[in-house]
Image: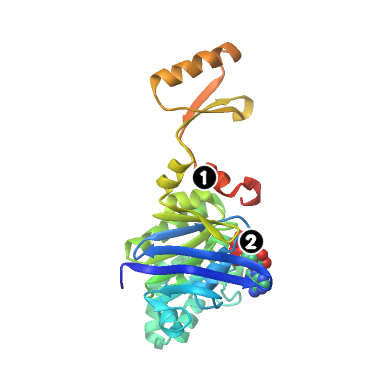
Amino acid sequence: MSKLAIEIQGLRKTFGRQVVLDGIDLNVETGTVFALLGPNGAGKTTLINLLTTLVVPDAGIVKVAGHDVVKEKKEVKRSISLTGQFAAVDEVLTAEENLRMISRLSGLSASESRSRAAELLRRFDLADSAKKKVKTFSGGMRRRLDLANSLVADRPILFLDEPTTGLDTVSRRTLWDMILELKQQGITIFLTTQYLEEADQLADRIAVISEGRVVADGTPEELKARVGGEVLEVRGTGDVVLESIPIDGSVRDVSRIINELSARYPSDTRIAIRKPSMDDVFVSLTAKPKEEIA
Ligand SMILES: Nc1ncnc2c1ncn2[C@@H]1O[C@H](COP(=O)(O)OP(=O)(O)OP(=O)(O)O)[C@@H](O)[C@H]1O
């Protein structure tokens, strides 16, 4: 595959009078993890639907694995797999039956399907639950099975629409490890997420979309650098942040600020110095309250 797994130029999509994507330009390099962030309704799922040929663009050039999503739909479909927002597994079947069914549907023989299912169950830590019906599974197990299902066919590009929404912290971290393992195998991963930490932990590059446009595109570090340097926080009871003061990181600057603070706060007041977080990036770029996206 060429250096770019995904190329998007001047992409526009409207639904009726609503302009959802208003001139999107993005590139995703082969073998990397790319995270798309944006507030609710920003058009993240629409962009995934366009890239996976489920929706047709109004204007612009969109290429996936070097193929045009409009003119070479079949070739695009052969290069991708998609895990949507809602687990697409059959509840009344066991984990193994689900995987074998998908394997058969994707053209593998009965014995190939059996060994593919066994391999995927092992890889996604589901071997002990292989014979259990999916309706008895936890949310994390379902997501892992869903991810396994989308890997039945060996495809170089994987789309994940909010892969960990609703999962607890442990299941989320397990899934992150699995996503990073897929990247190590050379798979390009394009994911959308509402969790800023997820993008920060997983992605080589992040794009933030807001009101139909890309408002930032870069590595997590580049995006954090855009919102400024370190801040000194003054913390009160219950770790509540009382003040956030930008600093330049020098002894001179920090000691001046601490002198000022010691005149205003009791001497046991806690302070902390922290780097900007993805939360700071998101809030500064989209100007929407954080509660809306978390
Ligand atoms: N098929 C459709 N017909 C009409 N409007 C649509 C259609 N699909 C999406 N929209 C509208 O496009 C906008 C973007 O929706 P989309 O689902 O892409 O956003 P999102 O960023 O994925 O949001 P969320 O984070 O809530 O999943 C929304 O206002 C939605 O109502």
Q: Secondary structure at mark 1?
A: helix
**Residue reaching furthest to the right:** 17
Q: Is mark 2 within 8 Å of ligand 1?
A: yes
Provide residue 121's location: percent of width, then percent of height: 43, 69
For the point 50% across and 13% down, the residue is 259
Which image quadrant for residue 185? Answer: bottom left
Q: What colour scheme does the image use?
A: rainbow
Provide residue 133's location: percent of width, then percent of height: 57, 72
For the point 56% across and 65% down, the residue is 22
With respect to residue 19, does 282 lie above or below? above
Q: Is mark 1 within 8 Å of ligand 1?
A: no
Relative to residue 39, is residue 230 drawn left or right? left
With respect to residue 275, does 35 lie above or below? below
Say what amino acid the circle numbered 2 marks: Gly
* Residue 10: mark: none
Residue 233 makes an appearance in the image: yes
For the residues labelled 2 and 1, the Cα–Cα distance comes to 19 Å
Residue 125 makes an appearance in the image: no
Label 1: how many residues lie within 10 Å, few (<14), some (14-19) or many (20+)? many
Say what amino acid the circle numbered 1 marks: Val
Quadrant, the N terminus: bottom left
Which quarter of the frame holds ligand 1? bottom right
* Residue 41: mark: 2
Question: What residue is shown with label 1?
Answer: 281
Q: Secondary structure at mark 2?
A: loop
Q: Earlier in the sequence, mark 2 or mark 1?
A: 2
